[in-house]
Image (cartoon, rainbow, N blue to C red):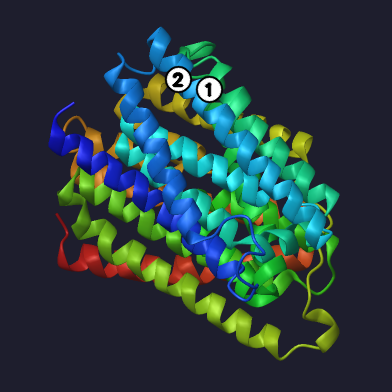
């Protein structure tokens, strides 16, 4: 190892100790001198000591060598034994029971070693993460105290769906036309569960109005249909919530219109002439509906102001909806492939019920050949329109008549505004 590299790595090891020690020292700053096991100086020296041990192991052939590995192992064991003994005595004197300081010191020493034998950037990033976790003690304890079992269970299920199940789900197209991809279906289930969980958390921590609107806008970046399904189920479970939940769907729909326009224009800039005015106007109409709905909701009776949810999402209901959405997507793609370019709009109308992005990408790539730009733009608009109509059906099936009526009003405003913009566009650009 070059001298300059060695010095820079030792400096990072020292900085790691100073960073973690700063947090530990600040937390115990009011205690009398000599009454604590380790402060900023001890942690700084611990990080540097780990760096020196790592440098010695590197000089002996590296940590992977027999001599270097034994040195690192024995050095860490000796350090851990000393710091654990002091922390034990401190706990006895204070009549407390905590291993945080001991574990933090061991982490500091280990990160100091790693900066000399591994990736300096990874070691520094890990040190920042350790300091953040230590500094968030009150927040983390409060969060654990307030979390419910259904919330924890749902979070674990979502993590299992994403980290454990997703990597092993086959990513091979099967079935008729090769349109059934198990991995895509599972991703749909994850999206539905994620949007539902995010909406639950937003409402719980930000309140009914702000939480619902933020969850709707954020969910619209991923899937406005998932937002609709989630809000529809909650509308059926909580009386008086239809209006504000419909406002969340409206914001999700507005974001969906903007998302579709951006995707299409990025892939094919010629589509902006038709899509731009139509989808922008529809998005503005959806946003206006959301504002009006929020205003009317805030003026409602006080007992209708809070929405209570018992569970972020149900696993089997999420999987069932994912299978249904996947079936509709496959049907739309099969229709488009069967009838070729002439069936593009019909295929977009079917598949657009639940998968606007796929239709947008395929139509944008088909223009100007074999589809002309006008036909491709109309197919994308039709897909966005049927997606909006599908929200009314979802609202009626899951959220009740009142929720469905709110969504119908939102859809009507979008159709009128977008249709007027499309008519004006064709009047000025008939080609």
Q: What crowding class fits label 2: few (fewer than 14 Cα within 10 Å), some (14-19), or many (20 or more)? A: some
Q: Nearer the viewer, residue 395 or 344?
A: 395
Please indicate, yes or no, whether residue 169 appears anywhere in the rendered image.
no
| Rendered residue at 69%/74% (across/down) | 207
Q: Position of residue 61 (x, y in %)?
A: 30, 13
Alpha carbon separation for disc pair 1 and 2:
5 Å
Q: Quickly name the residue at label 2.
A: 71
As drawn, is 89 to the left or to the right of 108? right
Please indicate, yes or no, whether residue 154 appears anywhere in the rendered image.
yes
Above or below: residue 276 compared with residue 372:
below
| Rendered residue at 60%/70% (across/down) | 33
| Rendered residue at 63%/51% (across/down) | 101
As drawn, is 237 to the left or to the right of 408? right
Q: Nearer the viewer, residue 244 or 212?
A: 212
Q: What crowding class fits label 1: few (fewer than 14 Cα within 10 Å), some (14-19), or many (20 or more)? A: few
Q: Nearer the viewer, residue 263 or 120?
A: 120
Give the quadrant of the N terminus: top left
As drawn, is 165 to the left or to the right of 366? right
Above or below: residue 253 compared with residue 170:
below
How many numbered marks appear? Answer: 2
Q: Quickly name the residue at label 1.
A: 74
Above or below: residue 306 compared with residue 384:
below
| Rendered residue at 54%/11% (across/down) | 175
Q: Which residue, as the protein is rendered here, is positioned at the far front? A: 34
CB under 8 Å between discs 1 and 2: yes
As drawn, is 303 to the left or to the right of 235? right
Q: Position of residue 305 (x, y in %)?
A: 77, 80
Q: Position of residue 255 (x, y in %)?
A: 44, 61
The answer to which quarter of the image holds residue 370 is: top left
Give the quadrant of the C terminus: bottom left
């Amino acid at each position: 190892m070059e001298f300059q590299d060695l010095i820079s790595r030792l400096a990072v090891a020292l900085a790691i100790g100073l960073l973690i020690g700063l947090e530990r020292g600040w937390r115990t700053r009011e205690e009398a001198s000599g009454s604590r096991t380790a402060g900023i100086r001890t942690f700084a020296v611990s990080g540097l000591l780990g760096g020196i041990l790592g440098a010695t192991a590197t000089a002996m052939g590296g940590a992977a060598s027999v001599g270097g590995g034994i040195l690192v192992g024995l050095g860490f064991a000796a350090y851990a034994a000393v710091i654990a003994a002091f922390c034990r005595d401190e706990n006895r004197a204070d009549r407390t029971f905590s291993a945080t300081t001991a574990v933090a010191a061991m982490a500091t020493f280990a990160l100091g070693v790693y900066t000399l034998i591994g990736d300096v950037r990874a070691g520094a990033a890990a040190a920042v993460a350790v300091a953040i976790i230590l500094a968030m003690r009150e927040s983390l304890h409060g969060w654990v105290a307030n979390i419910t079992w259904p919330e924890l269970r749902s979070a674990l299920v979502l993590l299992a769906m994403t980290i454990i199940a997703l990597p092993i789900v086959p990513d091979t197209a099967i079935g008729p036309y090769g349109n059934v991809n198990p991995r895509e279906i599972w991703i749909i289930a994850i999206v539905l569960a994620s949007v539902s969980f995010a909406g639950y958390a937003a409402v719980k921590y930000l309140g009914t109005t702000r939480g619902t609107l933020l969850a709707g806008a954020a969910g619209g970046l991923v899937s406005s249909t998932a937002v609709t399904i989630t809000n529809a189920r909650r509308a059926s479970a909580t009386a008086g919530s239809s209006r504000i939940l419909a406002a969340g769907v409206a914001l999700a729909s507005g974001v969906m219109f903007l998302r579709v326009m951006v995707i299409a224009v990025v892939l094919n800039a010629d589509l902006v002439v038709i899509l731009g005015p139509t989808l922008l106007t529809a998005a503005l109409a959806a946003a206006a509906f959301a504002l009006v709905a929020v205003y009317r909701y805030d003026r409602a009776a006080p007992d209708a102001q809070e929405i209570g949810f018992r569970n972020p999402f149900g696993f089997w209901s999420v999987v069932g909806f994912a299978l249904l959405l996947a079936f509709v997507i496959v049907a739309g793609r099969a229709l488009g492939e069967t009838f070729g370019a002439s069936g593009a709009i019909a295929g977009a109308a079917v598949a657009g019920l639940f998968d606007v992005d796929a239709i947008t990408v395929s139509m944008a790539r088909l223009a100007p050949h074999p589809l002309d730009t006008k036909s491709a733009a109309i197919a994308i608009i039709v897909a966005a329109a049927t997606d909006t109509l599908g929200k009314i059906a979802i609202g009626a099936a899951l959220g009740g008549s009142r929720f469905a009526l709110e969504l119908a009003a939102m859809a009507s405003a979008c159709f009128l505004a977008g249709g007027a913009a499309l008519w004006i566009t064709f009047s000025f650009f008939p080609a």
